[in-house]
Image (cartoon, helix red, strand yellow):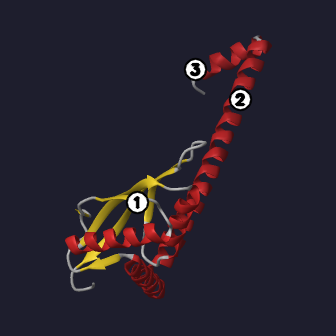
């Protein structure tokens, strides 16, 4: 036996409290090691479960039928979105058409003396032949005229995005309305 170990055992036999302390310390270390091993197993099991679910999702994406279905769904969505765009040969003609449309809407809504401002079309970055046109109609209008205007815009199959809506109807005075809007215009042969 190792002389150092023999000296330690002799010391521990002579001092029972020290021996008890060493035994308790060894038990604490063994319990701590067991807990760490258990925690590591739980962590590994959770990681394994997460990776298995990711693999299952990736396998689902890999299936050719899934991609075909997704592509067909995107084509249908793209077609529906394309039909909601405004169409014209050029952005200038699209702006003129939008001006006439807003004038007709204002007349149908019985908007008094509308001021119609249609901004210059701005190209949509990264999308060829797609333009954003913002506009505003303002003037004297009772709240019902503004609501009628919004209903006409809502019923149109084309996209007409309301950016801002203001209605003021002070007591004893004519009401005022202000609607800011935007549309998207596709130019070219698809018009």
Judged by depth in the image, the label closer to the viewer, 3 or 1, is: 1
> Around disc 3, counting alpha carbons within 10 Å, would you say few (fewer than 14), some (14 to 19), or many (20 or more)?
few
Residue drawn at the location 47% of the way across and 76% of the way down = 156
Q: Which quadrant, please, contains the C terminus?
A: bottom left
Q: Which residue is mark 3?
A: 3
Residue 87 position (above or below residue 165): below
Question: Which of 71 and 159 lies nearest the eye of the viewer?
Answer: 159
Quick one: label 3 or label 1, which is nearer the N terminus? 3
Q: Which residue is mark 1?
A: 181
Q: Which quadrant, please, contains the N terminus?
A: top right
Q: Secondary structure at mark 3?
A: helix
Q: Are marks 3 and 1 in contact (CB under 8 Å)?
A: no
Question: Which of 158 and 36 lies nearest the eye of the viewer?
Answer: 158
Q: Compute the Cα span from label 1 to label 2.
A: 72 Å
Q: Which residue is mark 2?
A: 28
Q: Compute the Cα span from label 3 to label 2.
A: 27 Å
Question: Which of 35 and 97 lies nearest the eye of the viewer?
Answer: 97
Question: Which of 68 and 185 lies nearest the eye of the viewer?
Answer: 185
Residue 95 in the image: state x and y as whole percent. 27, 69
* Labels in figure, total: 3
Q: Compute the Cα span from label 3 to label 1.
A: 94 Å
Residue 70 in the image: state x and y as whole percent. 46, 81
Residue drawn at the location 36% of the way across and 67% of the way down = 183
Residue 48 position (above or below residue 75): above
């Amino acid at each position: 036996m190792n002389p150092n170990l023999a000296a330690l055992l002799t010391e521990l036999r002579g001092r029972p409290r020290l021996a008890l302390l060493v035994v308790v310390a060894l038990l604490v270390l063994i319990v701590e090691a067991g807990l760490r091993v258990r925690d590591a197993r739980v962590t590994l099991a959770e990681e394994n479960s997460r990776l298995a679910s990711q693999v299952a999702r990736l396998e689902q994406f890999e299936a050719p039928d899934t991609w075909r279905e997704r592509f067909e769904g995107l084509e249908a969505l793209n077609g529906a979105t394309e039909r909601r765009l405004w169409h014209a040969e050029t952005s200038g003609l699209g702006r003129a058409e939008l001006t006439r449309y807003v004038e007709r809407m204002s007349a149908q809504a019985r908007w008094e003396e509308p001021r119609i401002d249609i901004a210059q079309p701005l190209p949509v970055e990264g999308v060829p032949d797609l333009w954003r046109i913002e506009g505003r109609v303002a003037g004297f209008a009772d709240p019902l005229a503004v609501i009628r205007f919004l209903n006409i815009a809502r019923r149109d199959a084309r996209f007409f995005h309301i950016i801002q809506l203001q209605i003021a109807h002070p007591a004893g005075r004519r009401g005022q309305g202000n609607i800011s809007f935007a549309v998207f215009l596709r130019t070219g042969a698809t018009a």
